[in-house]
Image (cartoon, helix red, strand yellow):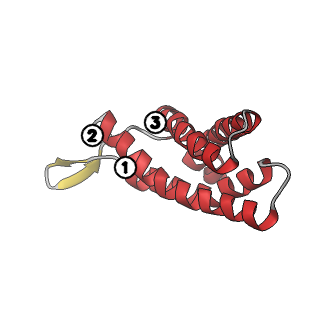
Amino acid sequence: MRRLLTGSFARYCVGGALGFAVDAGIVLLLEQLAMDPFTSRVFSIIIAIAVTWVYHRNVTFTPAGDGILKELGRYYVSNALGAGVNYTVYSAWLILFAPKHLIIPLAVASIVALAFNYVMAKFFVFRAKKVASGSRMKRQR
C-alpha cells in the first residue's frame, strides 16, 4: 500500500488531477462561450492529453528512449482509447441525468478512465527499452 501511495501511481494521479483541471477549465470556458458540451469536450481532451504527456514524461515515468515522436504517438493512441471510455461515460451521464453543472460528469468519466490510462502509460507508452548485456536482458532506465 505504501508503494502505491508513493510510487508512479501516486505521481500519475497528480498528473491526472492536472489534466482534469485543464480539461474541466476548457470545457467550462467553452460553455461560457456558448459551445455545446459535446464539442467542447473534444477540444478539452486533446489539450489535456498534451499537458499530461509532458507531466508524465518528466515526473511520473522515465521516457521510453525510442524517440519523442514515437512516445507521443503511443501516448495519444493509448489516451485516445481512454478518452473513448471517458467521453462515453461523460456523454451517457449527460443524456441520462441532464445535469445543470458539467463538473460531475467530468469527474465521474475521468475517474473511470484513470486505471486504464495508467496501465497503458506504464506498460505501453513509457515502457523501458531492453538492451542485451551478454546473455541476459536488462531494463534500460
Asked if disc 2 and disc 3 are in contact, CB closer than 8 Å, the reply is no
Q: Is residue 76 above or below residue 51?
A: below
Residue 2 numbered mark, or none: none
- The amino acid type found where label 3 is placed reads Arg
List x then y, in percent, for residue 31: 73, 39
Horizontally, residue 54 falls left or right of residue 71, namely: right
Estimate the spatial distance between the alpha carbons at disc 3 and disc 1, rounded to whole Å.
11 Å
Horizontally, residue 138 falls left or right of residue 110, namely: left
Q: Quadrant of residue 93?
A: bottom right
Residue drawn at (55%, 46%), measured in percent from left and top?
8
Determine the residue located farthest toward the bottom in the rendered image. 96
Estimate the spatial distance between the alpha carbons at disc 2 and disc 3, rounded to whole Å.
13 Å
Q: Quadrant of residue 113?
A: bottom right
List x then y, in percent, for residue 117: 53, 54
For marks 1 and 2, the one nearer the N-term is: 2
In the picture, which quadrant includes the C terminus?
top left
Asked if disc 1 and disc 2 are in contact, CB closer than 8 Å, the reply is no
- The amino acid type found where label 2 is placed reads Asp
Determine the residue located farthest toward the left in the rendered image. 134
Q: Secondary structure at mark 1?
A: loop
Which residue has dot 2 on it?
A: 66
Residue drawn at (61%, 51%), measured in percent from left and top?
3
Q: Quadrant of residue 86?
A: bottom right
Asked if residue 115 can be seen in this view, the reply is: yes
Which residue has dot 3 on it?
A: 57
Crowding around mark 3 (Cα neighbors within 10 Å: few <14, some 14 to 19, many 20+) is some
Q: Is residue 12 above or below residue 118?
A: above
Residue 127 numbered mark, or none: 1
List x then y, in percent, for residue 131: 21, 46
Residue drawn at (72%, 33%), measured in percent from left and top?
33
